[in-house]
Amino acid sequence: MKPLQKKDFGMTSKGAQATLYILENEAGMQISVSDFGATLTSVLVPDKDNNLVEVTLGYDDVAGYEAGTKFFGATVGRNANRIGGAVIEINGKEYHLTKNDGENNLHSGLDFYHGRLWKVADADDTHVTFEMDSPDGDQGYPGALVMKVTYSLDEENTLMIHYEAEPDQDTIINMTNHSYFNLNGHKSGDVLNHTLWLNADAFTPADAASIPTGEIRSVEGTPMDFRTDKTIGRDIEADYEPLIFGKGYDHNWVLKNEGEFDKVAEVAGDESGIHMSVLTDLPGVQIYTANFLDGEKGRDGAVYEMRDAICLETQYYPDAIHHENFPGPICKKGEKYDTRTAYRFRVK
């Protein structure tokens, strides 16, 4: 590994200095992370011609991330995705959350984790650990905790994200990373010719507000079947209610890893030759094909449009608190929340 680099990332609107931390391996792969939001701001990967390709959508500086509303590279918590009715019940007590997605709660309301300055708890040439105090009542959730997010890079071109917390009350914890990937390069247009493979026999259909119905539906014979890799664009316009509701793919798939850290997905760029494997111990993954990007001004003068990227957000299923048949997102008092997701890059 090459030495850790630190760079000025600009000032926040509150006058706080944001910093960028850059990890680089001997193969030339680089990842950049910021203490603003514990955000993954950049992933540079060698392509089939050994040219470095920026494979994530993002902004030039902290001002872009502070103003942005699309969650580029965001560390999302305390609960990623949606909670129906923006209300939860834990141990018989109701907690009311912010309604920021119609009548529902999305990514924990408007006081987002990725809009805060985190502390750097530990850093060396291989990893950076951010931590943040989240008090009892933060975003409406019970229980105080210290959330830790560690980004690491190894010589096998694996970017690992490790989440850790230990609440002092029973609470929901469901962290994810919301990076938008385009393996042909962040300025290369849509990802409809990328291929996708998912180790999932089922998905969780949702209503028109993207709240799961509770059904776990087989992908067999549907446009949601990625058990054999196919292009993202092949079925995205199919006359199929979940795709119509989501304006494309924006759904949770039921992974077959059974709680083990294992490969659950692979995406391949058709022009760059870059393949990205996704590994996780979590039970679900939200596949989102950037259906609501519309002229978003990004880094290096890029303008990002609909379907210019794919997100693979590992998670507990959306609205799991309201569905007993979904894996539970509750972390008990004194228990360790400890989960890993990795993105591994290679050229084929």
Image (tube, rainbow, N blue to C red):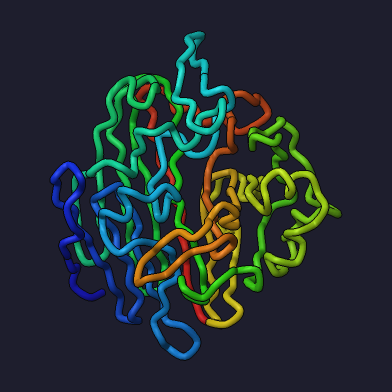
Q: Is residue 288 left or right of residue 178?
A: right
Residue at 43% over, 49% down: 71
**Residue extending furthest front?**
295
Q: Residue 310: x and y, percent?
A: 56, 60
Q: Residue 131: x and y, percent?
A: 25, 42
The total of numbered circles placed on residues is: 0
**Residue extending furthest bottom?**
49
Q: Residue 141: x and y, percent?
A: 40, 23
Q: Nearer the viewer, residue 271 or 327?
A: 271
Q: Nearer the viewer, residue 111 or 325?
A: 111
The N terminus lies in which quarter of the figure?
Answer: bottom left
Residue at 29% over, 30% down: 134
Q: Is residue 290 above or below residue 109?
A: below
Q: Is residue 50 left or right of residue 146?
A: right
Q: Nearer the viewer, residue 110 or 43?
A: 110
Residue at 49% over, 60% down: 295
Residue at 34% over, 36% down: 165
Q: Residue 288: x and y, percent?
A: 59, 53
The C terminus lies in which quarter of the figure?
Answer: bottom right
Q: Is residue 161 above or below residue 228?
A: above
